[in-house]
Structure formats: structure tokens, C-alpha cells
Amino acid sequence: MNTRRLIDTAVALVAGDKGLLAMDESVGTCNKRFAKLGIPQTEEARRSYRELLVTTPDLGQSISGAILCDETIRQRVKNGTLIVKTVVNAGIIPGIKVDAGTNNLAGHPGEKITEGLDGLRERLAEYSGMGARFAKWRAVLFIGDRIPSQGCIEANAHALARYAALCQEAEMVPVVEPEVLMDGNHTLEQCREATANVLQAVFEQLRTQRVILEGMILKPNMVLSGLTCPKQATVHEVAEATVTCLLRAVPAAVPGIAFLSGGQSGELASARLNEMNVAFRRRAPWALTFSFARALQQPALEIWNGEPAQVTAAQQALLHRARCNRAVRRGEASMMPRWTVQARFLVFPRTTRKR
Ligand code: 13P
């Protein structure tokens, strides 16, 4: 294994003020998002949309890596170039989602286990040959009545560590994603406790499976009040709870933490990450960056809406959110009085949206 190459890739993915674009929605998830907007759920529509994303001019100035899915890595843009090659040409490192989705965890009602370890060594070799330099695996944990259970936490942590070790064997950087979902009426404190338990188990398993911490990236949830919790934490409370939780669980050897957005609006996800970089960067030994899907893509998807004439406006919306998050990494929003009044900075002008 070329450890140097692995570490260099991990460091490049979280370097400077760039972050990751997660565009690896499975066919099913992508179709669901299309269906909500009335976009045809065809392979060609998914290909066109992914082409729109990766051909956005100047995207590589704000995005260090793009996570593709199995369908996308095999597709081509209109001029015949492979999408994965188009990503590289844009100065972006290509990655690939390699988990096979979730299934019910036996004996644990209401809980999920992520599958996909069978044949993973062979699939990683194929993806590496296609140009992917990093990979992603997402575990999902719910907060509820006596869940997440220890059985669910340990099973998912073990699978994440087995996946991460296989990635490193293939000289691909594992993005390790244990997502504690924001659905529910739990408090910020309950989310902090669940997230801490999950992260502790994940790092125990990563050590047991001999994963090189310098050659991986952690992709966690932010610590949030549940979506339907009557008391919603402030931006500062979220930033503080999240960084405190991570400081207790994540070794300093990990080069970067790239948050998922998990269904937060693009503006809130940016505001919370900005606050972490403004208030806590000096205490954090790792880069605090983003690996958003919805928080980067949603305005672009809505503007595009399946219409070729809307491609340029949609690309501008994607670029805008990517640039906002680039500024967030620099903690630039701190120079502005309040997030709530920064409409120009945060919100894409809706007037360009055709309905
Ligand atoms: P969201 O940012 O939409 O949560 O997606 C991130 C991701 O990659 C989920 O696996």
C-alpha cells in the first residue's frame, strides 16, 4: 500500500477553503428528488443533471472532490467524455459511493444496517481503475425510544471500519460517514450523546481494523436539535455542541471532518459550519469542511427542473452555493453583521428561476 499517496489525497480533499460535492444519490434517491419536482425519472435525465453539475464553469475553485455513484461513473457528457474524466479536467478529485444502501437490522426493530461488503475488494479495484481516488460509505442511525441501540451502533461501526480498511488496501481514501439523522423531536443534548456514542464506537473499530487515520476523512452529522423538537438550538449552540462532541471523539491524526447537510437548508448548513470555523477553528486540530449534497444542489435542481434552457441558471445557483461554502471555510461571514441579514451572501436570487 502506498501510504504517502493515500495521505496526500486525503489532505488534498480537505485543503485550503474547498470542500466536497456529494452527487452520489442512488438511482432510487435521485428519482425521488426528481419526482417531487415532476422531472422524468429516466437514466437520460439523471445523466443530463449530473452533466450539468460537473460542467459548471469554475466549480473546481470551490470544490476539491466530487462523489459519484455507480451509474454516473460509467456515463458520459454530451461530447462523449466520461463524466469521471470531466471531473478530473475540472481540477476535482473523483470519488465513488460504494455502499449498497441500508436494510433492516435483524433483531433491532426500527434500525438499519448498511450493506455492501461482499465483493467490495473487487469493486474498489474496478473503480480505482476508472479513476476514483476516494470512496464513501454511509451508515444511518436514528434517535428514538432507546435507539440507537448498542447493537446497531457496533454493527455499523464494524462495517464502516471493514470498508475503510479495504479502501486503504486499494489506495483509495475512505470517507467514513456515520449519520445520526435529524428526524425526530429529540433535543440537542440527545443528539450530542448519540453522536458521541457512535463516533466513539467508529474510532474503536477503525483502530481495531488498522485503518490509517491520516488517510481517511470523517463525514459526520452536525449535532442538531431534532427537526420537530420545540426548542431549536441557535447557530452558536449547534457549532459548540458539534465541535465539543468531535473534540472528545475524533483523534487529531484525522486530517479533515467534512459534514453532511442531512436535510438542513443550504443557508443554515453554511451558517452553522461558518460559526464552527469562526468560533472554534483554533481549538480544532482537523479541517472543518463540507461534503454536502442537498445543501449544495437543491437550488440548482429546482431551477433546472429538467429544462435544457435552465442549465446556465442552475449552474450559477450551484456555483453560488459552492462559493458561499468556500467563504464559510475561511470564516468570512464573521466579518458581516448577522447571517440573517446577509441575503445577498446566502440566498440565490429566485428571480432567475423559471416556473
Ligand atoms: P446531504 O448533504 O444531502 O445530507 O447528503 C450528503 C450525503 O452524501 C449523504 O450520504
Image (cartoon, helix red, strand yellow):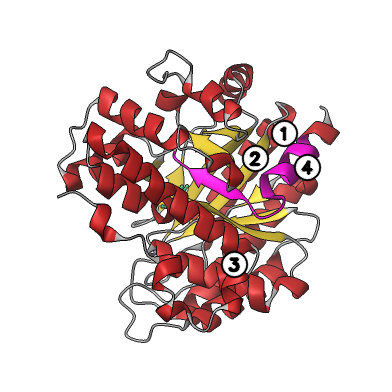
At 44% across and 75% down in the image, what residue appears? 342
Q: Which mark is residue 168?
A: 1
Q: Total number of numbered labels? A: 4
Q: Callout 3: helix, strand or loop?
A: helix
Q: Which residues are magenta?
A: 6-23
Q: Callout 1: helix, strand or loop?
A: helix
Distance from Cα at disc 3 to Cα at disc 1? 25 Å
Distance from Cα at disc 4 to Cα at disc 3? 20 Å
The amino acid marked with disc number 2 is: Pro
| Place of residue 345 in the rendered image (x, y in percent of width and height, measured from the top left) | 46, 67
Distance from Cα at disc 4 to Cα at disc 2? 13 Å
**Sequence-earlier tag: 2 or 3:** 2
> Where is 282 relative to 311, above or below?
below
Assess disc 3: are there few (<14), some (14-19) or many (≥20) residues with their C-alpha within 10 Å of its C-alpha: some
Q: Which mark is residue 210?
A: 4
**Sequence-earlier tag: 4 or 3:** 3
Instruction: Pick whichever, 177 or 10, lies toward us.
Output: 10
> Where is 98 relative to 125, above or below?
below
**Sequence-earlier tag: 3 or 1:** 1
Distance from Cα at disc 1 to Cα at disc 4? 10 Å
